[in-house]
Image: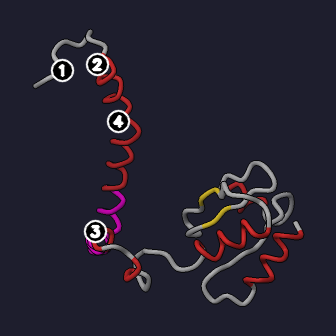
Amino acid sequence: KPDWDKLMDDFKDSPTALVADVDCTTDGKDLCEKHGVRGYPTIKYGDPGDLQDYQGGRTYQDIKKFAEENLGPTCGPGENIELCDADTKGSIEKYVKMSIGKLEGRMRNIVKTHEVELPLMKKVLAHLKSGEGGKSEL
């Protein structure tokens, strides 16, 4: 905890990065549940809408180096679009032009493909590779 407090102090005046702690047993309980915090201490980083688990070292030097290299603005729609590579920028620009309903529909289709079709395809592929599925070429 002293190392974390020191890191919070290092970043307290940063206009682009936030280092904070949340007490998951009191006022922060809902926030912790939303982001899947189950053990303590847990360190999360990244876009507030898509926080990632930090897996690095826990010394002050480790977390300070990680924070300096990874915290701050990231590629995304709006003012940070210039931080994106050309392919990502093109995708974002395409999605921004869609209606909310169309974008939500596209997301549902991708989730269905990922959660339903992909596992089924993996089973079929394993079956074909086992030799029980007949020809492996079209």
Is tag 4's residue or tag 1's residue first in the polypeptide sequence?
A: 4
From the viewer's side, name the closer residue of 55 and 96. 55
- The amino acid marked with disc number 4 is Leu
Label 2 close to label 1 by CB (< 8 Å): yes
Res 29 → quadrant: bottom right
What whole-number distance in Å separates the C-alpha atoms at marks 4 and 2?
16 Å
What whole-number distance in Å separates the C-alpha atoms at marks 2 and 1?
7 Å
Furthest-front residue in this view:
61
Is tag 2's residue or tag 1's residue first in the polypeptide sequence?
A: 2
Q: In the rendering, which numbered label is found on residue 87?
A: 3
- In the displayed structure image, the side of residue 116 where residue 69 appears, left or right: right
What whole-number distance in Å separates the C-alpha atoms at marks 2 and 3?
34 Å
Q: How many marks?
A: 4
Furthest-top residue in this view:
132
Mark 4 surroundings within 10 Å by alpha-carbon count, few (fewer than 14), some (14 through 19), many (20 or more): few
- The amino acid marked with disc number 3 is Asp
- The amino acid marked with disc number 1 is Ser
- Residue ID for mark 1: 136
- Range of residues picked out in magenta: 90-105
Q: Is residue 13 above or below residue 21?
A: below
- Residue ID for mark 4: 118
Q: Is residue 2 above or below residue 12?
A: above
Res 79 → quadrant: bottom left
Can you see residue 129?
Answer: yes
- Residue ID for mark 2: 129
- In the displayed structure image, the side of residue 109 where residue 29 appears, left or right: right
Residue at image point 59% right, 59% down: 52
Furthest-right residue in this view:
2
